[in-house]
Amino acid sequence: MIPHTFRHTCPTDLEEAYGQLQEPDALPLAGGTDLIVNLRERRARPALLVDLKHCPELRGIEMRGDDLWIGACTTINEIRQSSQIRSALPVLTDAASRFACHELRNRATIGGNLANAAPCAQFGPPAVVTDAVFEIGSAHGTRIITAHDFFRGVNQTDLQRGELLTGIRFPVPNEPSCSASGKLSRTKGMDLPSVSMAILVLNPSRAEFREVRIAVGSVAPVPLRMYRTESILSGVPLSPDVMSAARQMMDQEIKPRASSLRAAPETKRAALAALLQEFFTTFGLLAGTEGGQR
Amino acid sequence: MKRKIKLTVNNEPVELEVSPEMTLVECIRNELHLTGTKLGCGNGECGACTIVMDNLPVRSCLILAIETDGAKITTIEGLSQGTELNPIQKAFIQEDAIQCGYCSPGFILAAHALLQREPQPTSEQIHDALGGHLCRCTGYEPIFRAVKRAGAQLRQPSPESQPPAENGSD
């Protein structure tokens, strides 16, 4: 039993949910894979749980203009299985594929992962690297905010009382692109990332037009873009010297804490350097000459 | 405040009153007295409490009973036909995939859901489906063999729904 009493409601549309979320000490419930653990361990003590799973406006995967829209209550397995996502932004498929385990992926939602804002949240780096836009709603209206501005600290976001993350818009590049995300964890099976990285490369096979974007998770309270590393890798042929300079710059851009939960700072630095190398190899952009990736 | 919920458990309609604080695993074990479902870590990390809900394997320790109104649930008790074990259960016996047995219901239900959605799973798919389950006895290999064996048996439409004898190596 959860060690304190609360009420549970099941609104069937967003307006009803917004009304109920106005109540002080109300918390939204999506997949529950974090929240129910927090309830049991007394880290969360809501008076009311507003169950969002029956609001159809919060679910789905579809193109809206040039953006791929994913409803906040879309489950991780729904993302993983979407061929539309796999072809448009494989960085999201990668993040979903290595997320916890099959049973948790059937419940956990992308909105829950992002709104919990754990430093190791697996969709944080992909959201930041794609310049995703977060849609937020409440009884007072809707607003949008960039992924960059959404994350404020460990388990802290820009969401105000009564507000709900309703969907995420991921801009789909018009130009040729490749993207991926990866993580290091202590075990190969189910574990939170010790460190994670998402990468998006626009115009991968034309060095002079190439734009590289990199975001990392679990090295700071929020997911970080590696802007200075990106500028070293963008617009030039990728020689071993350039890769080496990029690794050194990334080392300067991150400052992992010694008190980190899951890996020592040196381990995180080494893992990120390896992930960077691995992505560029997989994309076929290394090996001396420019690869012929699409 | 208690609320009445209606759900289908192992193909039987069930109506009961639950308080919001009750988790699904507690409801299954303490209210429905289906004690085949095991509570392990209580945090979704071990897989012992896995059940199948609306055709998807889920962790019953991370779901509130009150969330399951209208759901269709299968527990380990729902797999056998009377005293006739399900082919997955038989394969677990044939491959010695059970020692203490505490993790077995979770593994078997995860395998059941896998074979329903993917009748011919690759080794990678089996690892992916079972990767969130802990077993402290068997070393996992017999479990993977059992799932492979069950998959092969389920694909054969032959009427060999007899107790193990023909194919069993023991």
Image (spheres, coloured by chain):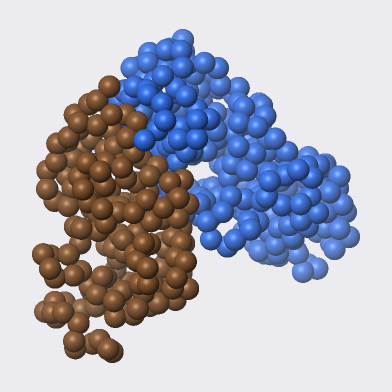
Chain colours: A blue, B brown
Q: Nearer the viewer, residue B12 or B39?
A: B39
Q: Quadrant of the C terminus of chain A?
A: bottom right
At 81% from the left and 54% from the top, the residue drawn is A266
Q: In the displayed orientation, state which residue is furthest to the top.
A: A140
* Residue A66 at x, y percent in the picture: 52, 36
Residue A95 percent location from the top left of the image: 55, 50
**B40 sits left or right of B113 in the view:** right
Residue A163, above or below A54 = above
For the residue pair B46 and A283, the one nearer the viewer reads as B46
* Figure check: A72 above or below A162: below
Residue A130 position within the rendered picture, expressed as x and y whole percent measured from the top left: 62, 40
Q: In the drawing, does residue B21 fall left or right of residue A291?
A: left
Quarter of the image for the N terminus of chain A: give it: top left
Q: Is residue A43 above or below residue A292?
A: above
Q: Nearer the viewer, residue A166 or B145?
A: B145
Q: How many marks?
A: 0
Q: Tell me which corner region of the image, top left, top right, bottom left or bottom right, holds residue B92.
A: bottom left
In the rendered image, residue A56, in percent from the top left (x then y), is placed at 33, 30
Depicted A41 relative to depicted B1: above or below: below
Residue in the picture at 49% in, 19% down? A163
Quadrant assignment, res B127: bottom left
Residue at coordinates 46% horizontally, 27% vertically from top-left? A166
Q: Residue at x 65, y 56 (%)?
A: A184
**A264 sits to left or right of B53:** right
Asked whether B18 or A79 is in front, the reply is: B18
